Image (tube, helix red, strand yellow):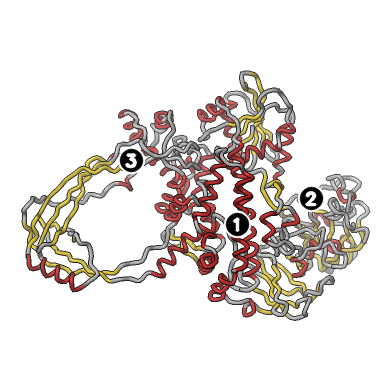
Amino acid sequence: MVAEKPSLALSIASFLADRNQMHSRRGQLDVHEFEGRFQGRPAHFKMTSVIGHVLSIDFLPQFQNWETTHPASLFDAGTKKSEANPKAHVCRHLQSEAKGCTHLVLWLDCDREGENICFEVMEHTLAWMQRVPGQQVFRARFSSITAPDIRAAMDKLVQPNENEALAVDARQELDLKVGVAFTRFQTRFFQGRYGNLDARLVSYGPCQTPTLAFCVERSQSIAAFQPQPFWSVRPHASKQGQALDLQWDKGRLFDQEVTQLYQHLVAQAGQLRVASVTEHESRKHRPHGLNTVELLKVASASMGLGPHYAMQIAERLYTSGFISYPRTESSGYPPGFDFSGTLASHRSHPIWGQYVLALLQGGVQPPKGGKDVGDHPPITPACSATEAEVGGGDAWRIYDYVARHFLGSLSADAVSKKTKVVLSAGGESFHAEGVTPLRSGFTAIMPWKATEAAALPPMTEGEALPITSVELHQGKTSPPDYLSESDLIALMEKHGIGTDASIAVHINNICERNYVSIQAGRKVVPTELGNTLVRGYQKIDPELCSPQVRGHVEAQLSLIAAGKAEKGSVVMHTLAQFAHKFRFFVAHIARMDSLFEASFSPLSSSGKPLSKCGKCARYMKLISARPTRLYCPSCEEVLALPQGGTIKLYKGLSCPLDSYELVLFSQAGPDARTFPLCPFCFNHPLEGAHLWGAGAGSKGGMPCTMCPHLGCKHSFLRQGVTPCPECDAGTLVLDPVSAPKWRLDCNRCNFLIYLPLDLHSVRVSRRTCEECDSNLLKLSWKKGSASAIRAGSEDQEACAVCDEDLRKSCDVKHGRSYAVRRGGGRSRGRRGRRGGRGRGRGREDPLMSFRDF
């Protein structure tokens, strides 16, 4: 049995094991085993989990290099699925646990994404399972992590829905190819021309861009708005000492002289006569069930919580068993929903327990209306919990709202009496309104929705009230406000942009890409870059940012999920349309570029000289604005650099391969890495090199510490000491600028070793250790230090792996220490003697070992 997260696996296993003894094994992913019955027969159960998606889609290797692949070719490029979390070894874990099992029960989240993960799990389990006659794969459908719901799901197992999984595959392929093609072209084009974009990627997304367009269109409306003055007549009168708030039936006029005429007529009348008094009951209907979109809107508008953050909290509450599944489009409850049982669990709650008892005594009235789309019931509290149990803070605010909304949906409507008085003077009509609450209904548990009392003094038809003054009120029309996150979510839902599972992600993306900023009141305000991008799309092809285009694509995906359309046909047709749009976009990019020219500074006037170009020998400029990069004005070449640190010139040294001056990259923090790199090699890695960070392409670049060329004295072949004991893939390399705290850094992971503090200098020797094949270190100790006295000399050659005195004096950070066996070598099977014999890449592509050179 496989759940979507480790915490869910433990909860589900605990409910199903019931009173049977459960044994848990801790490994890469926990496994919980117990005995029970399956389909009427005794069975041994193994419950484990994945960590979200098992696989992720990407282009084949030949299409991943930004330099050699034209973006237009990506629409027809081949793709493959690979392990989404390779360090977690989920695939290997599933294959291992599937051995010997006869049946598979899938406990993934019950939405399209969960259905897709079901088939990813099946791909890595079925071939390893024992084959038996009959159905072997079952799907559990549940909406909350509670014992009754989990046991009910186990009793009503179904088959996984392949059509829904195919719809997700189609969306993933479309978003990958369309998004990456536009993003690569835009990024390279604009980052090669402007220096202050302040964006690592100038990205396009089929959902992200229409979301941004909503914000920009509102911003354009505000900028284009021209205020107009208006005037209205406001007579002032009172009854029993209470001033009346009178509204003119004409509202407002945009002609001052005409309004002054009406003012004169009313003032001349001297009194207001009551024309009519009407009263009626008004009902404020109780809410429907709570779906995802409504929860996110309330979290943003009322709690000040961003939708992405609110969704994270809701998911934690769900996995902890406090609320039902938080990703649902349904606002109507399915037939047979157990309202009484859910209510009864809250009878003893310290805050709303008495309210629940009153609801139970009066008979539960199921909510009316709402829409049941058949995915999940509305979001409800799965159990009764206090603020301390939930964890307080924002988690309690979300849980409290979910619980109150559920109770409110089972309560009576709120009823109030509304009074409207119509008065006349000088031939003009005015009115005043009052409201008196009669029955609080659901607002007793949701007080923020209660109607405020505003009673009018008693008046009768024909009564006259003296006018104390007549005001000529002047105002002016005001522009619309910026969209709030709540407004944006509503627009996305209306136009079918994203799903209940992805709306929060798309809003978060445009924030992280620096296209919008969240300002006071959770208002979404476009940045200069966001405005320029959307205006550029509108000048070239407005459909690129039109919500109708994405809405059409989502409708096609829904047809796949319903089994009414074939995945391949939908993908091929949609890609052909976007490929045509891409070619038109590239041909007319000058229209967008003219907008960028007006908003951003060209590279030629940005940055400051730093290092020499290997082609023209002139100085390249360091562009510090995000992303950090080098620009050669003579060659008009842009070279990407690693991000998240500082760049400076490195000792005036040049790369022996291409003559570019080396620079030194330093990360922030006490244990952060520092390494030299050649700007050209970082963007054009040698074959067989490791990659790090984010270079020109999406798969990173090559610093000197990962260079496999023997001629580079900074490569891991020259500065490498021994394979990394932590990641099994990297090499520990001497940090050349770490003095006086000399250290060895892994060129792949964050494992590092601080060498003794009483070292004066350290170099890597050409000699290797006879026991483990590691390169020896040439150590120069400080005069009179204890280490120099112990070694009998100020200069010494020693192995960092096998020399016990040296090893004991080192400080290991971010990883485990070496384990040395009797007779030398390492406890991991003396990895140094295989393949590359001590070099980190020797197991994969043994170009040359340390001993060979």
Q: Secondary structure at mark 1?
A: helix
Mark 3 or mark 2, which has the lower sequence index?
3
- The dot on residue 408 is none
Please state if 235 lies on the left or on the right of 32 as rendered.
left
Image marks 1 and 2: residues in contact by CB distance under 8 Å: no
Disc 1 designates what residue?
578
Please state if 444 lies on the left or on the right of 646 as rendered.
left
Q: Residue at x 41, y 53 (%)?
A: 301
Q: Is residue 575 above or below residue 734?
A: above
Distance between the alpha carbons at the discs numbered 3 and 1: 45 Å
Question: What residue type is disc 3 on?
Answer: Arg
Residue 281 point in image, percent of width and height:
21, 42
Quarter assignment of residue 813? bottom right
Quarter of the image that includes the N terminus: top right
Question: What residue type is disc 1 on?
Answer: Phe
Residue 577 point in image, percent of width and height:
59, 55
Mark 3 or mark 1, which has the lower sequence index?
3
Distance between the alpha carbons at the discs numbered 3 and 2: 60 Å
Quarter of the image that includes the C terminus: bottom right
Disc 2 designates what residue?
728
Q: Residue at x 67, y 37 (%)?
A: 121
Q: Secondary structure at mark 3?
A: loop
Q: Secondary structure at mark 2?
A: loop
- The dot on residue 286 is 3
Question: What residue type is disc 2 on?
Answer: Asp
Of badges 3 and 2, nearer the viewer stands 3
